[in-house]
Amino acid sequence: MIILKLAVIIIFILILIRLRIDLGLTLFSGSILAGLIMGMSLKEMGKSLISTSTNKDTLNLIGIILLVLILGKLLQSAGNLQNMVDSLNNIIPEPRIAMILPASIIGLLPMLGGALLSAPMVEEGSRGMNLSPEEKTFFNYWFRHIWEYCWPLYPGLIVAVTVVKIPIEKLIIIQFPFTILAIILGLIILFVRAPKIENRSRGRSNYLKNFVLLFKSLWPIILALVLIFAIKISMVLALGIVVVLTFILLKIGIKDRFKILIKSISLKIIFLLYSVMLFKKIILESNVFSSILNIVGTKGSAPIILLFFTPFVIAFLTGVNHAYVAVSFPILLPIFGIDKPDLVYVMFAYVSGFLGILLSPAHLCLILTLQYFKAELKKVYKILYLPVGIIGLTVFLVLLFSRIL
């Protein structure tokens, strides 16, 4: 019976997603439905609605995500992203590497449709290589997303560790090899498909000047990482310090700075994050966890099937990087383990969902890149299938060997 109830909740959420209802409203509606189906009284649901809004984890999550968004907008407005790309292009002597650097560097900051920002730079960098529109689309799209397995500024990673309640550095360490694998696979395809061409000088004579420019462009990100991982202060405080310093040092008028600040604050994002935590709370307060464990257990193929298909299907349907985490991770908590989460299971679910993101025809980065290069999705898929398949096989083998050992 509990599986039927859970299926109704998931199907309801998927229907709203397919109808393109706002994700925050979808999860909020799913939370209310879950509470009603699981037998919560109106008084209990009211308490959950209020307590979620004042919960420390909820406020911390909202603060971190908003600060990340603000930092991204400030750096974009200050020209830091363009300076990063220019300095690295001038430092790297290999034109093929220089071509994919814009996408990979811009990928360090979560930006909606960020692949469109790097597409013109990839276009310029590919001059003389005789690449097809589909190949340019792949390189821009693939290298834009190599960091999402482990980069601590990505909302999906932040939501995952908040829901599962594990230190972010633990998830970064276990998923970092997939970023390395993604880079290797991308480079293999790059060197196979893109011919070696003569080095095009881009001001490489003054390396010191370019390294200084690179550091000046990256200092906010470097400082944030030092504060979080070396000095060990909270992520929200570290990002707050960096945002304040960046805001003060931004070389534009004070009115323009506040305009950037206001534009960066999204009520939709705040409501979405609140809805994520509400969904988790209502699922936690129901008896769904013990029931799921009694039915599927923690061994055998059933939990593995759920760990793969739940995030993958949601990711493929939404194309939104943090949506599959927001919807699937609260449901998968009993399989992860509530008191002592299994990091390999968490990694498996996260990577499985991200593979769905990479293949999703609803993914904004893919849509925008296809339009920019006038490429055919079918032909891009022919390039995507192999590296996505290898990453999928790798994460399955890691899970398999972890269960054997």
Image (cartoon, rainbow, N blue to C red):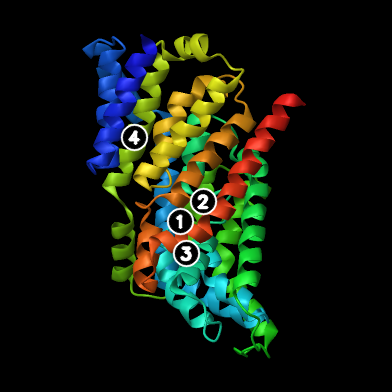
Give the amino acid at mark 3.
Answer: Thr
Of discs 1 and 4, which sits in the foreground?
A: 1
Q: Position of residue 27 (x, y in %)?
A: 30, 32
**Which label belongs to residue 110?**
1
> Is residue 62 visible in this depiction of the protein?
no
Give the quarter of the image for residue 255: bottom left
Q: Which residue is mark 2?
A: 153
Helix, strand or loop at label 1? It is loop
Q: Which mark is residue 246?
A: 3
As drawn, the label of residue 274 is: 4
Name the mark on residue 6. Answer: none
Q: Please tell me how crowded label 3 is: few (under 14), some (14-19), or many (20+) other residues with Cα within 10 Å.
A: some
**Distance Cα–Cα, label 1 vs label 4:** 20 Å
> Horizontal and vertical percent for residue 158?
50, 42
In the displayed structure image, the side of residue 22 where residue 311 appears, left or right: right
| Residue kind at label 2, given as amino acid type | Leu
Is residue 350 something that shows in the picture?
yes
Looking at the image, tell me whether mark 1 or mark 2 is earlier in sequence order.
1
Query: For the point 60% across and 60% down, which residue is it?
Result: 222
Disc 3 from disc 1: Cα separation: 17 Å
Which of the two discs, 3 and 4, labels the residue nearer the N terminus?
Answer: 3
Of pointers 1 and 4, the one earlier in the residue sequence: 1
For the point 67% across and 88% down, the residue is 206
* Dot 4 and dot 2 residues touching (CB under 8 Å): no
Report if the CB atoms under discs 1 and 4 are less than 8 Å apart: no
Q: Are marks 1 and 2 in contact (CB under 8 Å)?
A: yes
